[in-house]
Image (cartoon, helix red, strand yellow):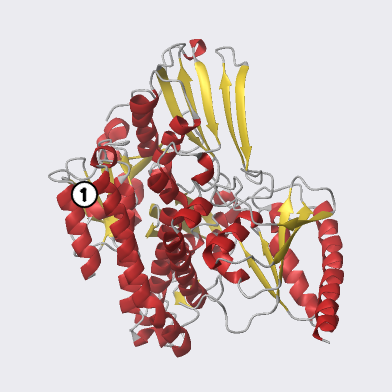
Amino acid sequence: MNRELETAAHPELLRRVAIDPVSRVEGHGKVSILLDQDNRIHQVRLHIVEFRGFEKFIQGRPYWEVPVMVQRLCGICPVSHHLAASKALDLIVGAKQLTPSAEKLRRLMHYGQMLQSHALHFFHLASPDLLFGFDSEPGRRNIVGIAAAHPEIARMGVLLRKFGQEVIRVTAGKRVHGTGSVPGGVNKSLTSEERDGLIRDADQMVSWSAQAVGIIKELHRQNPALYDSFGAFRSNSLSLVAADGGLDFYHGRLRARDADGGLLFDQADAQGYERLITEAVKPWSYMKFPYLTALGEEAGWYKVGPLARVINCDHIGTPLAEAERREFVAHCAALPAQATLAYHWARMIELLFAAETLRDLLEDRDLEGDDLVTSGERAFEGVGAIEAPRGTLIHHYRVDENDLVTMANLIVSTTHNNQAMNTAVREVARRYLDGRELTEGLLNHIEVAIRAFDPCLSCATHALGRMPLELTLLDADGRQIDRLSRRSEEPL
Amino acid sequence: MSEVSESIAPCLIFAWGNPSRGDDALGPLFIERLEAQADGHAEWGSFDCLSDFQLQIEHALDLAGRERVLFVDASLSCAAPFEVSLVTPCRDKSYTSHAMSPGALLQVYRELYGEAPPASQLLAIRGQRFELGEALSHDAQAHLEAALAWTGAWLSASSSGRRAAAY
C-alpha cells in the first residue's frame, strides 16, 4: 500500500497550496499540496487538529461523570461517545450483561444517532457535490442550494434528522447533554406516549431512507466511471460485527479484512485492542496513524466507517437493507469496494438499516420496562467499543479504588481513517490536479474525497467569526503569492 | 411527521455552544440563567428556550409558528459586551456543518416552508477563550450579565407590544 506523494524529495524547491480549513467537515482540517513550476504534484498531506488533551480532561474525575462529560467532545456524535464510555464503565461496575430493557434503550438511542448523523451527512454535506457537480458554482454547493433546486430532498434530510434527534431526546432525556446512559444500564425508559409518537413516523423514515439509497444508486448508474474510480485505493477494513457476522452498530467483536476481502482476524474481543492496533506518530501531523500490529505500519493501515462495515459484514438483519447490501456487493463484482465515493452508497444502506431497526425496535415493550440498571463485581479497567457513524470508536478507562479515572485513552473513527483519507486525497490529486492550473473547483475535488469519510475533526467550538476557509499560494521561500479567503458569515 | 409542536410560544430564544470550551459556554449558560430568572418576570410574557451544540438544518423546524426569534451565540468578533443585529435569510458561505449561520437557517426555513421566516435577531456575546476544559472567563461573565439585562428589557417590550396589538 504505497506512500507515494506523502513526502516530497525537495520540498524547498516547491510551491505550497493550502486548503485551510477544509469545509463541510466537523472541526479543523488543512490540506497542503506541494507543486513545482509546472504544477506537477510532489506532496499532499491532510493535517488534522485532533482533540488533544481530552484524555487529560477526563483524568481525575469520578467515573460516573464520564458518560456525560464525553458528550462535550463532539457536537456531531455526542451519543456515540456517551455510549462508548458507558460500555467501558459497565465493566468497571461489573455489569457484564445489561438488562434487556437497558440494552434495547441504548440500542434505540444509538440507531437514532446513526440515522440523524447519516442523514445530515448525505443530505446536507455531500449531496450538494453529488447533485450539482464537484466544480459547480460554489454558491450552490450547500444545503440552501439543495433546498432551492431539490426541495423534496432537502425536506427529507431535515425530517430524517428531526426524527433521529427525537429518538435521542426521549432516550437520553433531552436533546443535548443527555444523561440517559449510565454505567450498568440506563436511567430512563420510554413512556407509551413517547413510543407511540415515534412509531407513528417510523414507516415514513424507512420509506425516505429507501429513497435515499435510490438517489445514490442512481448517481452511480449515471456516472459509473466517476463513482467507481474517484479516490479509489486498496486497503484493509476494520469494524465490529455481531456474533453471527451481521452488521451491528451497538455491539460486536472486531473483524478485519484485507483489500481482497480475506479475513485477517475475526471475533476479536475489543478488550484486547492494544494488541491488535498500534498507533504510529508522524512528525507532520498531530493525529496518530493506527495500523494492524500484525501487518506492520506499511501494510497494516485500514479504513473504518460505513464502507468498511458494509463490506466486512456477512449480512444485514433487516430485509430492505440486506437486499441493498447484496446489490451493492454485486455491483462491486469480485473485490470489496475500493472507491471513496462508495462510502456514500454504503452510508445510505446503513441509513436504511437504522430506520428499519428503529421501526422494529419501537414495537418492543421492553422499552417501557423498569429494570434498567445492573451491577456485579467491581473492576478497575474497561474498554468500550461501538460503531459510531464514522466508524469504530474505542474508549478505554482505568479507575482507582476512590472511583477516580486514572487513565483514559480514546481512539476515534477519524483517527482510524487518517491514513485512508491521506491516501484518498493523494489519489485524487494525482488524477485530477497534477499538471493543471489549480482552481476552486479542482481543489473542491480534494474536499469531496475527504468529505466522503465524513470526518469529525475536532469538537464543537464554533464561535461566530472563527471559521474562514483560506487558500494561500506560497512560493518556495514561503512568500505569499496569492490568497483567497471565505468567511462563513459573508454573503455569497 | 409533525413539523410544528402542538404548544409553542410566539417567541423563541435559541442559543448554542459547547459548555466545556471556555467562553463557548456563553450560549448554553445564557439559556440556563434566563430560564432561572423567568419565573420572577411575568412581564416577559411567554417564550420558549432552546440550546444546542450548534445550529443545524433541523432547527428550521423549531422556528415554525414563531413571531420572533432571538439567536444567541458567543462571538470573537463583536464589540464587548454584546451586539444585536437583525438576521435575514441569506445564502451565505456557512458551508461547514458546525458553522451554519442564523441567516442560512432562515433561508432553509424559507425554502422548506415557502414563506418568510419569523422576525429574527442575533445577540452576539463577546467571548475570548475557547479552550477545552476552561471555565468562563471573567470578562465573558460580565458580558453575559449585560446580555441578560438587555434580553429582559427586550422580552418586556416584545410582550407589551403583543398585548397592545391584542386590544
Does A144 sit above or below residue B43?
above
Q: Residue at x 60, y 70 (%)?
A: B62
Question: Which chain letter matches label 1?
Answer: A
Position of the N terminus of chain A, as image quadrant, is: top left
Residue shown at 60% from the left, 61% from the top: A61
Number of callouts in the render?
Answer: 1
Q: Is residue A9 left or right of residue A490?
A: left
Amino acid on which the number 1 mark rests in the picture: Phe
Question: Where does the image place residue B68, in percent across and percent down from the top left?
Answer: 72, 70
Q: Position of residue A163 (x, y in %)?
A: 45, 71
- Pick whichever, A61 or A348, lies toward us: A348
Among all residues in the image, which is located at the extreme left? Answer: A334
Residue A98 shown left or right of residue B59 in the figure: left
* Element marked by disc 1: strand
Residue A177 visible: no
* Residue appearing at x 53%, y 53% in the figure: A144
Relative to A247, B65 lies left or right: right
Near mark 1 (Cα within 10 A), the count class, few <14, some 14-19 or many ≥20, is: few
Point out residue A404 in the picture as x, y percentages from the top left corner: 57, 62
Q: Is residue A446 visible?
A: yes
Q: Please state which of residues A192 and A50 is positioned toward the viewer in this rendering.
A: A192
Q: Is residue A382 left or right of residue B78?
A: left
What residue does disc 1 label? Answer: A265
| Residue A98, placed above or below residue A29 | below
A203 up-or-down from A271: above or below: below
Q: Quadrant of the C terminus of chain A?
A: top right
Viewer-nearest residue: A445 or A420 = A445
Q: Considering depth in this image, is A357 or A285 the residue closer to the camera?
A: A357
